[in-house]
Amino acid sequence: MYFIWNPTSQTTQPQLFINRFDRTGYWDIDIRIMPLQSAAWVDATTGEISCQNALELECWTRIPGQTALQNGHALGMIEQFLVGVQNTALQGLNPYTF
């Protein structure tokens, strides 16, 4: 899951929160933290963050009988996001290699 923190934002949105696993309580998220864009892990109406819909960084499990990663699609989405940050927000200040 990726979010942004904007201490000066004036936008209104539902209070983000994470339910406990047994749904007996919840944790409020700082109101300055918001989803970067419409995302499957945030309910835009209620503000609930669903950990079941999060992208996974797990990169070891392969599709049985193939060489492709079982979680390849999510890894590709995360890579696209990070490349976007590098190309726009950092404006070339972060080199590809160190």
Image (cartoon, rainbow, N blue to C red):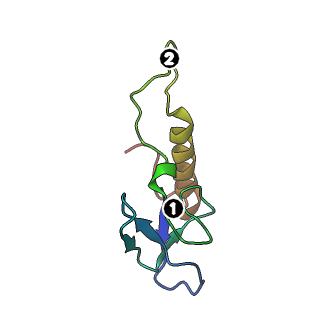
- Mark positioned earlier in the residue sequence (2 or 1): 2
Count of numbered circles in the view: 2
Discs 2, 1 touching: Cβ within 8 Å = no
* Label 2 – label 1 distance at C-alpha: 34 Å
Residue that protrudes farthest toward the top in the picture = 65
Q: Is residue 21 left or right of residue 50?
A: left
Viewer-nearest residue: 54 or 72:
54
**2 vs 1, front mark:** 2
Viewer-nearest residue: 72 or 83:
72
Residue 64, given in percent of the width and then of the height, sits at 48, 17
Viewer-nearest residue: 91 or 67:
67
* Amino acid at dot 1: Leu
Q: Secondary structure at mark 1?
A: loop
* Amino acid at dot 2: Thr
Q: Eyeballing the image, is 64 above or below 11?
A: above
Q: Is residue 47 visible?
A: yes
Residue 29, given in percent of the width and then of the height, sits at 41, 74
Residue 47, given in percent of the width and then of the height, sits at 54, 71
Q: Secondary structure at mark 2?
A: loop
Q: Eyeballing the image, is 91 above or below 31?
A: above
- Residue picked out by circle 2: 67
- What residue is at 46 percent from the left and 50 percent from the top? 95
Disc 1 crowd rating (10 Å Cα; few below 14, some 14-19, many 20+) is few
- What residue is at 56 percent from the left and 65 percent from the top? 36
Quarter of the figure with residue 23: bottom left
Disc 2 crowd rating (10 Å Cα; few below 14, some 14-19, many 20+) is few
- Residue picked out by circle 1: 90
Q: Is residue 54 visible?
A: no
